[in-house]
Amino acid sequence: MSSSLKTIELKAKQILVDSGEPIRYVYFPLDCMISTTTLMRDGSEVEVGTIGSNGMAGVQLILGIDRVPGKLICQIGGHALRGTADDFKKWCSSSPRFDAAMHRYCQAIVNALQQSIACNALHAVTARCARWLLLTQDSVHRSEFSLTQEFLAMMLGAARPSVTEAALELKETGLIDYHRGSIRILDRHKLEAASCECYFLEKERLAELFSQTSLPAR
C-alpha cells in the first residue's frame, strides 16, 4: 500500500474534487486540512465537515459512490499522501483489516456530524470556536495556521460578527492571537478549558469506536 502512495503538497483553496466530478484520488492529510462542502440551488456553498491527519478524503468509494454533490477543498495548506481511487479499492478488497478500518472511519464521520449538530444547538459561539481551533491544531500539528474569520464563521455555522466577537474574547484573554488571516494558539491548556465538552467527547468516542473489537488480520 505505502508504495502506491505519493506525498504531495496541497495549497490553500485548492479544489481536490469538484461537484459532480468522479473521485479519482484519495487523500490522507499529514499536516493540512481538507473541507467537505455541499452546494445549494442558488449556488451558495456551505462547509459540512473537515478532514485532518486522523482521517481521509474520498472514503465514499468504500460505499460504492464515486461522485458527490459537493466539493473537496484544501482549506489549510500542507502535505498529504495521495493514492488513486483504483488502488484504494484494491486495498479494501485485498486487506480485511484495512477494509474494516475504513468502515469504522465512515461511522466516525457520522459520529462527528452528530456531535457537531448537538454542539451548534447547545453551546455558545466562543466555546465552539475554541473547540474548532483545538481540532484544527490537532489536524495540522502546528500552533499557527492561516484561517480567515469568514471561513471560521462558515465552519461554525454562525454569523461573522458573532465569530469576530468570540475570537476577540479568546485573544483578549491570552488564549490566541490573530492577524491578517493567521491564527496562533498561545495557551493550549486554557483553550481546552474554554472549549465545550464536544471536543473531548469526539476524541473519546473515536478512540472507543476503534477499540471495541480487534480488527481482522490481514
Image (spheres, grey):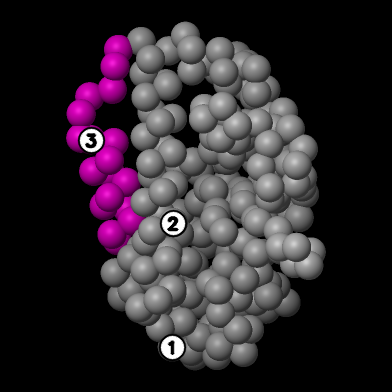
Q: Secondary structure at mark 1?
A: loop
From this viewpoint, is residue 77 visible? no
Residue type at mark 1: give it: Thr
Residue 144's spot in the image, x, y percent? Answer: 58, 64
Q: Which residue is mark 1?
A: 173
Give the Cα separation between the discs numbered 3 and 1: 38 Å
Left or right, 82 with reference to 21: left
Name the N-terminal-most of marks 3 and 1. 1
From the viewer's side, name the closer residue of 147 and 20: 20
Task: From the viewer's perspective, tell me whether residue 103 is left or right of residue 165.
Answer: left
Q: Amino acid at mark 2?
A: Leu
Residue 211 numbered tag: 3
Q: Which residues are magenta?
A: 200-217
Residue 61 in view, yes or no = yes
Residue at (40% x, 54% y) in the render: 112
Tell me where residue 20 appears, x and y as whole percent.
75, 42
| Residue 211 on the magenta segment | yes
> Do tag 1 and tag 2 residues touch (Cβ < 8 Å)?
no
Residue 124 shown in magenta: no
Looking at marks 1 and 2 on the same chain, the residue that comes earlier in the sequence is marked by: 2
Tell me if residue 54 comes above or below residue 3 in the rendering: below
Disc 2 target residue:
113
How far across and how far down the image is residue 172, in percent? 49, 90
Q: Tag 2's secondary structure?
A: helix
Question: With respect to residue 44, does 207 lie above or below?
Answer: above
Between label 3 and label 1, give the one nearer the viewer: 3
